[in-house]
Amino acid sequence: MSDDDIDDLDFTRPAKPSPPPPPERVASARKEATAGKPELTRTGFYVAMARRPREKVIPRNGGRYSILVVEDDSDLLKLVGEVLSKAGFLTRFARNRTEINAEFNKLPLPDLVLLDVSLPDTDGFSILERIRGNQKITRLPVIMMTGRSEVTDIARGLSPGADGYVTKPFKISGLVSAVNTVFAIE
């Protein structure tokens, strides 16, 4: 993917309907979500829901990893930004579709998206489907970060290809661990 031709990403326009994930992917996601439910009950977050890539993710800017945090709660946005910054990551922020659109049309693209499900003008599941449906960014790692912890919600995030699913409230160390896992740092 060339950074020169990324400018046509527009999350503010209505999305074309995405084809449903293949039944085997849905079944696999449901199985993974069900297996993670006891971990959520025990610890309050899903560390096990972070998927390790086949190979280490290389930062697009050649230096530090850049993470786009999509979250409409200003206090949580600030906290997550501070924690990720202290962990050595560059952070970018978006709170709605317009800001998401602006961040995806800014170069370089982020290396990972932490994506809240409940946003004021859209939902994270729809944004995830748009990311996975766009050939330019289809492989961009995405971790869902949400208060929705039912198996159906988790499966809904994992089925279209989320790389992780962290539920709120979460332990900050669990979130950083999930990010490191998705980047194949640990």
Image (cartoon, grey):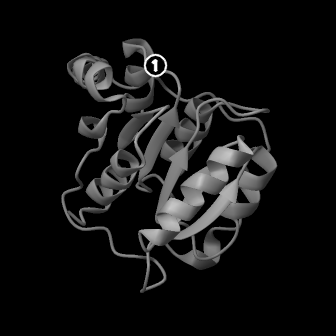
- Above or below, 92 against 69 in this view is below
Residue found at the far bottom of this picture: 62
Q: Secondary structure at mark 1?
A: helix
Q: Quadrant of residue 31?
A: top left
Residue 146 drawn at (x, y percent): 52, 32
Residue 72 image offset from top left, x and y in percent: 72, 41
State the image coordinates of residue 152 (x, y, percent, origin top left): 41, 13
Q: Quadrant of residue 5?
A: bottom right
Residue at x 54%, y 66% (from the top left corner): 110
Residue, disc 1: 153
**Which residue is painted at 29% across and 22% down in the image?**
33
In x, y percent, where is residue 8? Answer: 71, 61
Q: Is residue 9 visible?
A: no
* Figure quadrant of the C terminus: bottom left
The residue nearer to you, when weighing 32 against 12, is 32
Residue at point 44% right, 20% down?
149
Q: Is residue 174 left or right of residue 14?
A: left
Which residue is at the front of the view, 58 or 148?
A: 148
Amino acid type, callout 1: Asp
Observer-nearest of 172 and 116: 172
How many residues crowd mark 1 within 10 Å: few (<14), some (14–19), many (20+)? some
- Residue 109 lies, with reference to residue 162, above or below; the image says below
Question: Which residue is nearer to you in this view: 134 or 70?
Answer: 70
Q: Is residue 104 above or below residue 170?
A: below
In this picture, residue 142 sits left or right of residue 95: left
